[in-house]
Structures are given as C-alpha cells and as structure tokens.
Amino acid sequence: MKTFLVPISSLKEKMSTIIYAIDFAKAVGAEMIYGIQLNKIEEDDHLEELVAHAKKQNVDINFRPLPTEENIIDFVKSFSKDFSIDLVIASARTPKTHEKLYLDDLSGSIVRKTDMPVLLIPENYKFKTINTVLTAVKSGVVKMEGALKPLEASLEALEARMTLLQVKTPTFLPEDLMFDKDLAAVTSKYYSSENATLFQGVLEYIHVVEPEMLCVFRRKRGFFKQLWDDAIHDNGVRKSDFESRIPLLVLKGEQ
C-alpha cells in the first residue's frame, strides 16, 4: 500500500484522524496521503503543524478541496481511480449532536456507496503498535479478487499476526467451511463460535484475542446491515448496532 485518501468534513474536528493516517502510513511504508477537505481550511486549523508532522514521518501529504457542487462520494470514487488509492482512512468520530452514532453520514456513505477498502479510526485514537488483527467472518470464501490485499500488506509491513474468528450464524451453510487459500495463508490462529450475529461473536472473542485492529468484510447482512436498508434514509451507523473502539478495517466485496 502506497497511497491513502482521507476525506474529512473539518480539518480542526478531524485532526486526530489525519495524524493517525500519517503515523499508520509511516508504519506500513505508504508514501502519500491525499486529504479531501469538505470545508475551507482556516488559519486556526493548524495545517502547518500537520504538514510538519507528516514531513517528520517522511510521508507526503496533499490537501484537495472538494470541487464546488461535486458529490463527495462520486469525487471519492473518481479520485481513488485516478490516483490509484490503496486505502481510504475515515473517521468514526461523530458530531457531539449525534452521540449515539458510531459512523456519521460521511463515513457511512463511503462504506455503503464505494467498494474501496476503508480503515475507520475511533475518536481521538492515537496510533499504537499493531501486533494482532482479529478478522471476523461468517464464510471462509472470499468472492472478490484482491479483497485481502490491504490486510495482507498491513500484516506483512507491521509484522503482525492475524486471528480468524468464524462466526456460525443461523444462516451458516456447509460450504462456508471452505477457506480461501490466501485467507488461510495469513491466519495464525483460528476460533469458531455460534452466535446470532457476527457482532455478537466479536463481542465474545475480542477480550480473548485482545487485538489492536479489527477486520471485517463489507456485507449487506450482519455488519452495517442497516446501511443497505432502503427504509432508512441516512447513512449513519448507530452504536447500538455496531461500535469498535479500535481501528476497524472494512475490506471491499461481500461475503
């Protein structure tokens, strides 16, 4: 992974997400971060300090304003294609007026409406060494080619180990026991549980594994299922439905 994209609504409010992106880029050997700023950068946004931190970490950072009247999601899609973006890093921090949300509308829209891999960073979370990644799946079958690349690259660069948790939900099928060879190759430890949902399985095992990062696949059922509910007209994710207090890597494609 060489190039990251960080869409933010406000540099001042999302400063911690940008700083995490810089530190994570340094750790995994990425070279460039593009920031898409929805609002105009003001003098009191401490941009110079941010650029100095990036320079100290030997990471280039370049801010691009959202073009006038451009749809943010369409711009993220086209920008990601034009600039060969490997990973989108977005904030899980929510406005104070929406304390019950895990993802705000911007981050939720990116997860829902793009097929980019997304790393979601909790509020005010500071980068720390990643030794263990917990990946939660229902099925061992990976349907989209290249979906594992961000996970594989991160594990290799960080010299981290991946624990795989397979959660057998009521819709579990015998063929779900088949494992993609690339997923099997990066698995250091395996757990299996029976739960009503993937989220319940994660809650059961996260204190057993004690990971520094959580990884899931983008799915229309299970994680973030309300994002694809046509009866819901917003793109936010409520904490009552899902919440992660550590960075969450959402891989593209479905299971």
Image: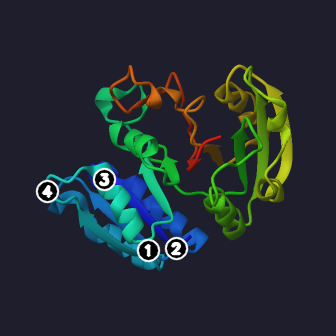
User: Mark 3 or mark 1, which has the lower sequence index?
Assistant: 1
Q: Which residue type carries mark 1?
A: Met
State the CA–CA distance, disc 1 to disc 2: 7 Å
Quadrant placement of the C terminus? top right
Is there CB contact under 8 Å for labels 1 and 2? yes
Q: Which mark is residue 2?
A: 2
- The residue that label 3 is drawn on is 74
Give the residue drawn at x 62%, y 56%.
Answer: 147
Task: Return the x and y of residue 11 as percentages of the image width and height.
Answer: 28, 55
Is there CB contact under 8 Å for labels 3 and 4? no
Q: Which mark is residue 32?
A: 1
Q: Secondary structure at mark 3?
A: helix
- The residue that label 4 is drawn on is 68
Q: Nearer the viewer, mark 4 or mark 1?
A: 4
Q: Secondary structure at mark 2?
A: loop
Give the residue drawn at x 43%, y 61%.
Answer: 19
Q: Secondary structure at mark 1?
A: strand
Q: Which mark is residue 251?
A: none
State the CA–CA distance, disc 2 to disc 4: 28 Å
User: Mark 3 or mark 2, which has the lower sequence index?
Assistant: 2
Q: Nearer the viewer, mark 3 or mark 1?
A: 3
